[in-house]
Image (cartoon, grey):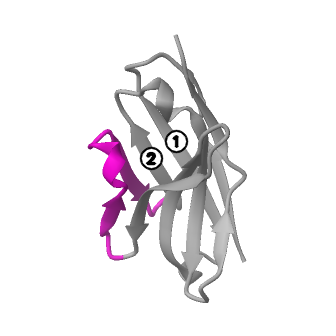
Amino acid sequence: QVQLMESGGGLVQPGGSLRLSCATSGNILSIYVMGWYRQAPGKGRELVATLQNDGRSNYADFLKGRFTISRDNTKNTLYLQIDSLKPEDTAVYYCNALLHTSQFVWGQGTLVTVSS
C-alpha cells in the first residue's frame, strides 16, 4: 500500500508564494503517476498538475505558469511550488498517486488560504 501526507499549506497574502510537500511512503515502486488536485470552497475537485515516472509533467490550462510540480526521489517527496498566489487559489490541495494497479491513493489534503 502507499501512504501520502501533505504539508506546507497556510495563510498567505496575495502575490506570495508557497511550496507544498507530499511525503510518500509504502510501496513506492507501485506508483505510476503522481499529481496535485485542489478543491475550492463549494466547488469540485480539479486537477492542478501531474508528474509521471519518466519526468513528464502536465498542468491544467488555467494555471498560466504559476505552478511548478517537482519531486525529490531521495526524499520520496512530491512538491508543488505556487507563485503569485491569488485569492481564487484558496483551496484544499490534495496529493494523489495512480498506481500500476489503476488504484488511486489520496492524501488528507492541506489548506491554502490566500487573503490580505
**Residue ID at (59%, 38%):** 91
User: Residue beneath label 2, please?
Assistant: 80
Are the residues tagged 2 and 1 within 8 Å (C-beta)?
A: yes
Q: Relative to 56, is 70 on the left or the right?
A: right
Residue positioned 67% across, 63% down in the render: 106
10 Å crowding of disc 2: few (<14), some (14-19), many (20+): many
Q: Is residue 69 magenta?
A: yes
Residue occupied by mark 1 = 20
Q: Position of residue 88 (x, y in %)?
A: 48, 31
Q: Which mark is residue 38?
A: none
**Residue 104 in the figure: left or right of residue 115:** right
- Identify which residue, 65 or 29, lies in the foreground: 65
Could you tell me how far apart the alpha carbons at marks 2 and 1 are, in whole angstroms? 5 Å
| Residue shown at 63% from the left, 48% from the top | 6
The front one of 83 and 72 is 83
Q: Is residue 66 shown above or below 57?
A: above
